[in-house]
């Protein structure tokens, strides 16, 4: 058995056209075998775990922290970001490139929300128990993690696993 040069479907050695996608197999080499995908799986599992914790946290605090509509909107956007990250990671576990794009949009949105919360909302949220510096530090921490995950997902070794 060999694999189709276009879609990777398993075909017999003497097949001239792929029964799945119709690609001509006569003059081309088959696709190389995919490399180990452990790194991508670990990233996806960490992402799904983090997104699940975010969703659980949001569910537990949704009724409590309703100072005003701005904070309610932030909570809703945070839930949407977590759902986007989880969806992207699940799709990447299924080897779909679309998952990488969905995750990227969610992660960039998360960076924007974190920046807006840390800098735009600092004057509103700052109290004696939550100083402005802590908001900025939490943004820097969130930014570092988000950028690190984005870079790791976009590494060639991981992108090459997706189609």
Image: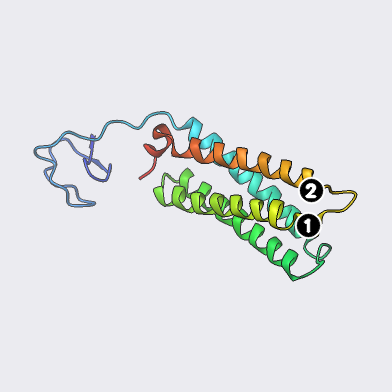
**Which residue is farthest left?**
27
Query: Which residue lies at the image location 64% right of the left edge and 61% below the top edge?
Result: 77
39 and 145: which is toward the camera: 145
Does the rendering let one see residue 85?
A: yes
Mark 1 nearby-residue class (10 Å; few <14, some 14–19, many ≥20): few
104 and 127: which is toward the camera: 127
Q: Are marks 2 and 1 in contact (CB under 8 Å)?
A: yes
Q: Which residue is mark 2?
A: 132
Residue 31 appears at what percent x and percent y?
A: 25, 35
On the picture, is 27 further left or further right than 134?
left
Does the rendering let one see residue 60?
A: no
Query: Which residue lies at the image location 87% right of the left edge and 53% below the top edge?
Result: 127
Instruction: Point out the tag, 2 or 1, that comes first from the N-terminus.
Output: 1
**Which residue is farthest top?**
36
**Which residue is farthest front?**
123
C-alpha separation, residue under disc 2 versus residue under disc 1: 8 Å
Q: Which residue is mark 1?
A: 123
Mark 2 nearby-residue class (10 Å; few <14, some 14–19, many ≥20): some
35, above or below 106, in the image: above
Query: Which residue lies at the image location 66% right of the left edge and 51% below the top edge?
Result: 114
């Amino acid at each position: 058995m060999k694999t189709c040069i276009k879609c990777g479907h398993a075909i017999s050695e003497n097949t001239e056209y792929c029964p799945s996608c119709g690609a001509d197999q006569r003059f081309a080499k088959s696709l190389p075998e995919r490399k180990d995908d452990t790194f991508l799986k670990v990233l996806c599992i960490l992402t799904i775990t983090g997104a699940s914790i975010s969703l659980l946290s949001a569910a537990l605090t949704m009724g409590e922290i309703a100072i005003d509509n701005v904070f309610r909107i932030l909570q809703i956007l945070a839930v949407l970001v977590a759902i986007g990250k989880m969806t992207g990671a699940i799709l990447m576990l299924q080897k779909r490139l679309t998952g990488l794009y969905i995750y990227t949009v969610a992660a960039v949105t998360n960076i924007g929300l974190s920046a807006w919360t840390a800098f735009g909302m600092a004057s509103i949220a700052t109290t004696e128990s939550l100083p402005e510096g802590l908001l900025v530090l939490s943004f820097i921490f969130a930014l570092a993690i988000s950028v690190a995950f984005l870079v790791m997902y976009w590494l060639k070794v991981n992108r090459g696993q997706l189609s």
